[in-house]
Image: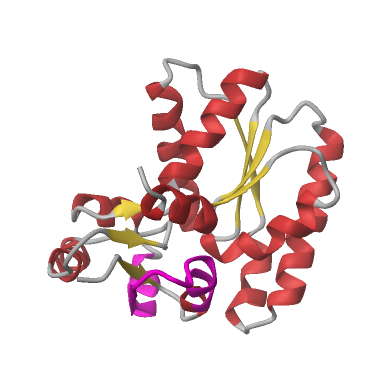
Amino acid sequence: MPDLTLFHTADVHVATFEALAPTADLKHVVRPDWLARAQDGIDTALQQEITLAMQAATGPVLCSCTTIGEAAEKAGATRIDWPMMQRAAQTSAAAGGAVLLVYCLHSTKEPSTSLLERAFAELDATPNIQHLPLTNLWPLFDVGDREDFNDQIATWVLAQLERAPDTSCVVLAQASMAGAKDLLQNRTSVPVLASPAISVEALLSPA
């Protein structure tokens, strides 16, 4: 039985998680077609397909795609962004500032916002969320221009932080955006959260 089975919608995430957990036994399932089909919503057929695939896996399951996260959770998987959203809500509740939720796919906005609101509700705290859509940058990821994709995310987020200096933390909503984390954190004191490392820590660290 693998330590963790991961479902991805892009091949790039395989290397990301292998680097984060080099000693773990990870099984990767890559289904880019699920993300393409989910852009207009997840219908019954897609939900059933996701459920059957994830329930067939042995051991703990992690879904690295935010767009299909809700469907994955219904299938019994852990959503990659749940531990991150919990940390973001805790940071905001303690510091008093808003969480800046940054995303590059429109289909990410609703599930990410809903999950962050749930994390606030767990703390019995009022959600304090600002959105920064960067959907114009997604084509850079699609064509494999990761460097420019990460640079552009960092540039836009830093500009937003200048306008809202009381921001409590930045949430990079999609795992695909994690490459921008260090670029940002090296240039701001505001905590920048990315889901891959946080989810691996939550699922694979000894209790």
Q: Which percent across, then down, holds residue 159?
A: 84, 46
Which of the pair 106/25 is nearer the observer? 25
Residue shown at 72%/66% (left/top)? 150
Residue shown at 20%/62% (left/top)? 59
Q: In this view, does 81 lie above or below 51?
A: above
For the N terminus, give its image quadrant.
Answer: bottom left
Q: In this view, does 149 lie to the left or right of 175?
A: right
Q: In this view, does 124 lie above or below 154?
A: above
Q: Which percent across, then down, holds residue 36?
A: 39, 74
Indicate how the structure is coloured in the image. Answer: secondary structure
Residue shown at 57%/20% (left/top)? 93
Which of the pair 110/206 is nearer the observer? 206
Q: Which percent across, then down, holds residue 122?
A: 38, 23
Q: Give the range drawn in magenta.
A: 15-38
Does 22 appear in magenta? Answer: yes
Q: In this view, does 12 lie above or below 51?
A: below
Q: In this view, does 169 lie to the left or right of 84?
A: right
Q: Is residue 58 left or right of residue 114?
A: left
